[in-house]
Amino acid sequence: MESLDEIDRLILELLQTEGRLTGAEVGRRVGLSQPAAGARIQRLEKSGVITGYRAVVAPAAVGLNIHAVVRLRTSHAQLSPALTLAAQTPEVVSTLRVTGEDCLLFDVHCSHAERLEQIVDSLARYGPVTTSLVLRSYPPKALPTGPAEAL
């Protein structure tokens, strides 16, 4: 995709924080007509800059009261099986491959401690694990859409 202009960046900032805005409202906020704003949004979707829209669900509201971060240190040969296991485990909501001593970081939401224990034990087949319980989550920030400003 060609480079993003300032209006594209404003649209991305808006949609990251308020994904249900109508094209007309996006246009109003960035100074475009509804058709012009809609065309830009479609272009951003077709080019892969906007990859989707989703509902954000409160884990505790659906009975997932335990939130943990599980780190796995494994060998290169065990990466693929560990990733397969994570993909097949519904409670693993995101996986990151990271640098440093650990190889993989899993974001896990469970209904009870026994289930977390099962998940940790199953991942431990692939190497040492470290588990941290999350005490509090803070709302994610929108991705920056422009150059970083000086601090």
Image (spheres, rainbow, N blue to C red):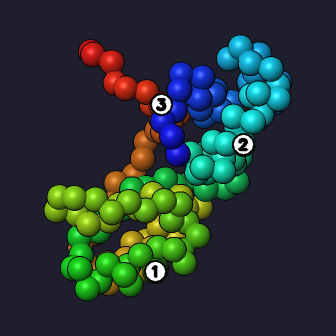
Tag shown at residue 42: 2
Tag shown at residue 84: 1
Q: Earlier in the sequence, mark 3 or mark 1?
A: 1
Q: Residue at x 54, y 78 (%)?
A: 88
Question: Which residue is identified by label 3?
Answer: 145
Nearer to us: label 1 or label 2:
2
Kind of element beneath mark 2: helix
Q: Residue at x 63, y 28 (%)?
A: 11
Separation (CA) of disc 2 from disc 3: 17 Å
Q: Residues within 10 Å of mark 1 (few under 14, many from 20)?
A: few
* In the image: residue 18, left or right of residue 123: right
Question: Does residue 55 appear anywhere in the picture?
Answer: yes
**Residue in the foreground of this view, choosing between 19 and 67:** 19
Q: Quadrant of the C terminus?
A: top left
**Figure quadrant of residue 16:** top right
Nearer to us: label 2 or label 3:
2
Q: What type is the residue that disc 2 sits on?
A: Gln
Q: Are marks 3 and 1 in contact (CB under 8 Å)?
A: no
Kind of element beneath mark 1: helix
Q: What type is the residue that disc 3 sits on?
A: Thr
